[in-house]
Amino acid sequence: MPRRLLALLLAPSRLLLALRARLARAALAAAALLSGVAFALWAAALLLRRGPRAALRRRRRDAAPAGLADGTFGEHRHLRLQGSGLRLHYVTRGPPNAPLMLLLHGFPQNWFCWRHLLQEFSPRFRVVALDLRGCGASEKPPGRDSYRLELLLGDICEVIEALGTPAGTPRCVLVGHDWGGLLAWEVASSHPQLVEKLVVMDAPHRGVMAAFMARHPSQLLRSCYVFLFQLPWLPELLLSLADFQLVRTFLTSVRTGIQDPARRLSEQELDSYLFSLSQPGGLSPPIHYYRNLFRAAPPPREPPRPPALLLWGSRDAFLDPRLGPAHLRWLRPSARLRLLPAASHWLPDERPRPLAQLIGEFLGGGAGEANIPIIPGIPGIPGIPIIPGIPVSPSSPGIPGIPGIPGNPIIPGIPIIPGTPIIPGTPGTLGIPIIPSIPSIPVPPVPPSSPSSPVSPVRPAPSPPPPSPPRTWRARRARPNPPGTARTHPNPARSLSEPLTKPFRTYTRRPNPPETAEPTRSFSEAAEPTRNRRTHPKLP
């Protein structure tokens, strides 16, 4: 009875969860179809612009380009995993007994994106750039289920246990970019004992990403390629058109590619990324990463316990730069965020030197010089190293490092005018001799000026004149008419017997032109009266 009651109470919750899952799958399918239509239109435009022959052409790459398979950037090795039996390829550089720094790449790259950091950190660490399962020179097991998220995390944990130091409790500094950063978040959260410090570049945590996309739908447009990769066989076809033109666009275009013109990828460096993708069966495995992304278990809610450094490009075309502060609010207080100005999504290729400085500061010391402190600067601007070892002279407190000039002896015996202050020296310019003063000469007092003195005393300024009173006007008295003068008043309306107050002047007026009589107009009672008062009289 209690079990049936409990099942009845949980039935509405299970129904809502099932409905939510169905709605999520339907929304994902709709987004995938829309993305497929949009990229199919791009492919149609490519076919019309270049023609079918050029659009379907695919260059054959038999030999690896220089630097990818040789020992230019490090020693190439393979590791056989005990759990899955896969053979993973990695490139290592640095002392064998040094602490391990594990570098994880993203899509569509391989270990080659870490070629600069391999050289920067090899003096202090045993740097290992790993080719993930199905990428680069590592083995590529067939099938979509071979690239589930839990299998990828198991591979990374086995690599840390096999190559990490010390032997009993292996740990590493874990660095990840793009898909490698997403895996680094999961490893640091689920296996914190294997990670000493965490560095993530342009890679979101799954939980933070889901909450951010709910508040900022514009991120859905930036991540449209993720929905495209949910479709079967179409992504492989679109990516391989015109010798991987879509991949070239991701890496080298003005909007999505590297922003710094001095760091643009050369054709040889671009071939290092396209070589493994162009091999038979080399394009589907990295796309399976995205196809299994929505089938994985829910992400951990707790932030990773190891200290974390988050690096983000301000011009990332695939991930909103506001994701960086969103992660900082979720992470622990010890986490740091650095936003690199005018940097794209491809930070390891575009900004290797600033990355080395920021990571070296985070790890305690520079990339190759552990004892040089770094001034913490503005977020996104790397610190400036301080040059140690230059002693500061005690005689020059204002300017450090410049020895002071010893002072010249002062000539004695010359009296100084009493009461004259000495100008104090500026800090840092001690030792400048002060010019000795001239003996004081008594000056007789100036007597006050007398009346007989030729020098006239100073007179005070004259006071301004008082203001004049306001001017008044008196009305003129009216003059009466002379006796015996009777004239016509100019105003006929007034009485003629009223005396004039002013002599009357006669004016000669010109005759008016003959007036034309206006025609009379009869009005009926039904007619509307006009309102022209100048022509017609006012009607009652």
Image (spheres, grey):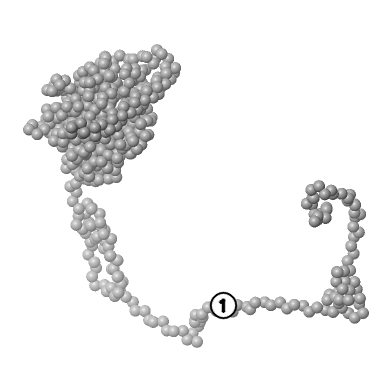
Q: Position of residue 101 (x, y in %)?
A: 17, 33
Residue extending farthest to the top is 53
Q: Position of residue 418 (x, y in %)?
A: 29, 75
Residue 72 visible (yes or no): no
Secondary structure category for the residue under label 1: loop
**Residue shown at the point (25%, 43%) measured from the top left:** 383
Circle 1 is placed at which residue position? 464
Q: Which quadrant would residue 191 be assigned to in this image?
A: top left
> In x, y percent, where is residue 415?
27, 74
Residue at 23% across, 57% down: 397
Q: Which part of the image, by quadrant, shows the N terminus?
A: top left
User: Which x, y percent locates residue 161?
Assistant: 12, 29
Residue 317 position (above or below residue 526): above
- Above-or-below relation of 478 to 334: below
Q: Residue at x 90, y 60 (%)?
A: 510
The furthest residue to the front: 1
Q: Is residue 6 visible?
A: yes
- Residue located farthest toward the left when viewing the structure as drawn: 168
Three-letter code for the amino acid on which mark 1 is drawn: Pro
Given residues 41 and 444, the one toward you in this image is: 41
Quarter the C terminus occupies: bottom right
Residue closer to the observer: 57 or 459: 57
- Left or right, 50 with reference to 92: right
Taking the spot 25% from the left edge, 41% from the top edge, the residue there is 330
The quarter of the picture where residue 103 lies is: top left
Q: Crowding near pointer 1: few (<14 within 10 Å), some, many (20+)?
A: few
- Mark count: 1
Q: Is residue 469 above or below residue 187?
A: below
